[in-house]
């Protein structure tokens, strides 16, 4: 019975939808970039998100994978803010449920592909930094 209750709790906590424009933008992206692999790119975005949370959790910005300098700077700022406030964010049971394209913009100089990610973190704890923490 306990297993059923746990499964029901997890199902209740799982987000049900994320609005996306993948069906609309995917054909246009494929026309513009025939070799583009959407599944691979979505996986890369999801991995980047998880690695950013892991970097914040550990206090080590070098754990971020495949991220822009802007994202690395944002994570580093979050880590430093946490340190200055004497807290540590601990992320557990990170789950990505769905990733969708939310926008696709193309002009003469740049192409931007935006994703919306449906995800849960089941437990977020704030703890005081250990005196031995070196980040």
Image: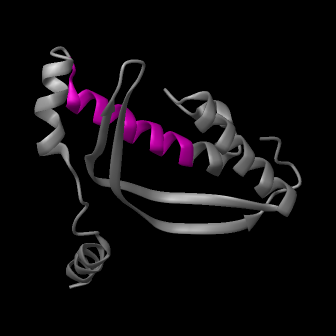
Q: What residue is shown at x 32% (from left), y 75% (from top)?
A: 13
- What's drawn in magenta, residue-wise? 36-53
In the picture provided, is 134 more to the left or to the right than 54?
A: right
Total tally of numbered discs in the picture: 0
Picture layout, residue 18 above or below residue 65? below
Please give left or right for residue 78 compared with residue 107 in the image. Answer: right
Residue at 68% across / 37% down in the picture? 73
Outermost residue, front side: 108
Kindly report the secondary structure that dominates the magenta region of the rendered protein. helix
Most foreground residue, 91 or 40: 40
Membership of 70 in magenta stretch: no
Q: Quadrant of the C terminus?
A: top right
Split into 4 quadrants, where in the image is the N terminus? bottom left
Instruction: Say above or below: 85 vs 113.
Output: below
* Residue 71, image x, y percentages: 59, 38
Q: Residue furthest top?
A: 35
- x%, y% of residue 24? 13, 43
Q: Quadrant of residue 63?
A: top right
Residue 32 percent location from the top left of the image: 19, 20
Q: Position of residue 62 (x, y in %)?
A: 65, 30
**Residue 46 shown in magenta:** yes
């Amino acid at each position: 019975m306990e297993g059923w209750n746990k499964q029901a709790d997890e199902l209740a906590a799982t987000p049900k939808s994320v609005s996306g424009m993948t069906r609309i933008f995917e054909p246009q992206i494929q026309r513009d970039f025939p070799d583009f692999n959407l599944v691979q790119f979505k996986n890369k975005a999801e991995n980047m998100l998880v690695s950013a949370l892991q970097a914040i959790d550990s206090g080590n910005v070098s754990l971020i994978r495949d991220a822009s300098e802007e994202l690395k700077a944002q994570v580093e700022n979050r880590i430093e803010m946490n340190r200055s406030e004497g807290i540590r964010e601990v992320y557990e049971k990170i789950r990505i449920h769905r990733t969708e394209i939310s926008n696709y913009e193309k002009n003469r100089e740049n192409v931007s592909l935006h994703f919306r990610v449906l995800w849960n973190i089941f437990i977020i704890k704030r703890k005081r930094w250990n005196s031995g923490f070196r980040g």
